[in-house]
Image (spheres, rainbow, N blue to C red):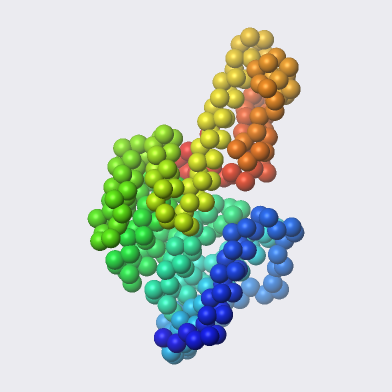
Amino acid sequence: MLRGLAGILVVAAGIGAAAAVLHARDVDGPLPIPAERLLYLRSGQAADRLFLNFDALAADVYWMRAIQHYGRDRKSPRIEGRFELLQPLLDLTTTLDPHFNIVYRFGAIFLSMDPPNGPGRPDQGIELLEKGLRHNPHRWQYAHDIGFVHYWHTGDYLQAAEWFERAAAMEGAPDWLHQVAAITRAEGGDRDGARQLLAEILNSGEGYLVSAAERALAQLDALDALDQLAAIIERYREATGQRPGSWQDLVAARYLRGVPADPTGVPFAYDPATGRVSLHPSSSLLPLPQGMRHD
């Protein structure tokens, strides 16, 4: 395949666009919404014939377009029709270049993210990674990533453990994967087990997963805080015969030192009518992972 200087420039542009997407929440104002949302080629085989020996260069272009589409829709205020081109673009890209590693791995994350940060399609993320495994059967990373998607997005801990075990058995896989598989099988869905798994991922050197693991640990910390706050509210009700009217009541009664906030600094929401405490709708830790929801 021919990549040449033009291909290098496209890759560089794609990497820059990816960085912009991953920091989209720091951008002021929404990205522009295109007047037309068209995908002229939906068949990877047709695209492969069309681009002849320039498949890899075309794959770079479609990957950059997938990144732009994801970033644009992530910032879009629209409710309907968001991310509808993401899966076709990723499928086209990986058909044109079946060994485009970053597309399988980042693409699966984009597809699996819950709304409003993504389409909430972990099934499509898993399908993309399975496609990567078919074309690259020795890449243990894809099997590992399928396990992670199952663990964090579908809540199917048995499937997650099986994929971690499959990854661990592949040539070149690191020893820590055996520990991840064991933790998942033994304690899937348990917060302590989740913390152990995420700690292993943080220490694994899998750079692109580190930020996801850090966010997941912050979510677990928030869940623990929600449980503690619920217990404090119940103690106040037992002592006074009524629920607190606001966080200030608990501060005044010295149950709290100040208005409690989640690990990102956003104050928790409190409903005095029900006594329920939750993450504020503006918290970047929402939505909470499947299987770890707070009742």
Q: Is residue 286 visible?
A: yes
Residue located 37% across and 61% down the image: 142
Number of labels in the image equals: 0
Residue at point 65%, 65% (across, down) = 72
Q: Can you give x and y, in whole percent of width and height, for residue 79 in the image?
A: 66, 57
Task: Name the spot of residue 265 as percent of width and height, x first.
Answer: 66, 38
Q: Residue at x 69, y 19 (%)?
A: 250
Seen in the picture, residue 280 relative to 243 is either above or below; the reply is below
Query: Can residue 47 be seen?
Result: no
234 or 208: which is nearer to us? Answer: 208
**Image height check: is 159 above or below 190?**
below
Could you say which is closer to the camera, residue 202 or residue 265? 202
The image shows residue 232, relative to residue 92, as above or below, that is above
Image coordinates for residue 283, horizontal then vertical, percent = 64, 43
> In this image, 73 relative to 98: left or right?
right
Q: Is residue 126 above or below residue 247?
A: below
Give the side of residue 184 with respect to residue 276, left or right: left
For the N terminus, the quadrant is bottom left
The residue lying at 36 percent from left, 60 percent from top is: 141
In the figure, residue 170 lies in which quadrant? bottom left
| Residue 46 position by quadrant | bottom left
Q: Position of residue 40 (x, y in %)?
A: 56, 81
Q: Nearer the viewer, residue 101 or 83?
A: 101
